[in-house]
Amino acid sequence: MNLECHWTVYRTRFLVRARQLSQPLVFTDALGREQSGRPGDYLVESSDGIKRITTQAIFEDIYVPLTDTDGAPGVLVRPVTRASPEQRPRATA
């Protein structure tokens, strides 16, 4: 499996990068644990660079891909709206 190929960015509470496996993969992670996956499972890389295998069922239940535009990694863009001074709640004693 070529690990230099395109990664898709997904989000849960934290952003991760992931690739769906097309063939079996076994490796020892940075913490010394053996990771193994089958085709369909996902190789997941967390923001600290730790890679692990997650089963397809668990991965697809938890993770949501960010949008992909023209092959570039997706970024969620949402306009920031600020309340005007009249709309801000005021504290009362």
Image (spheres, grey):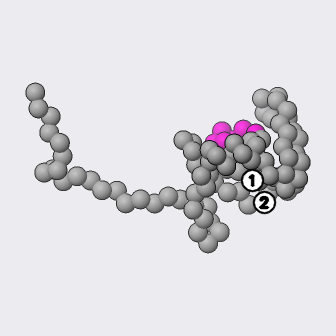
Q: Residue 46 bears which disc, if any?
A: none
Q: Is residue 13 visible?
A: yes
Image quarter of the N terminus: bottom right
SS category of the residue bearing label 1 = strand
Q: Residue 19 bears which disc, if any?
A: 1
Dot placed on the residue nearer the N-terminal end, 1 or 2: 2
Q: Residue at x 62, y 44 (%)?
A: 62
Residue that extends furthest to the bottom in the rendered view of this protein: 70
Q: Is residue 82 magenta?
A: no
Q: Residue at x 74, y 47 (%)?
A: 56
Q: Is residue 11 left or right of residue 58?
A: left
Q: Residue 5 bears which disc, if any?
A: 2
Amino acid of disc 1: Arg
Q: Residue at x 71, y 50 (%)?
A: 18
Q: Is residue 50 magenta?
A: yes
Amino acid of disc 2: Cys
Name the dominant secondary structure of the magenta segment. Answer: loop
Q: Is residue 17 left or right of residue 92?
A: right
Q: Is residue 63 left or right of residue 75?
A: right
The residue stretch that appears in magenta: 46-52
Q: Residue at x 67, y 57 (%)?
A: 8
- Disc 1: CA contacts within 10 A as few (<14), some (14-19) or many (>=20): some
Q: Position of residue 42 (x, y in %)?
A: 76, 48
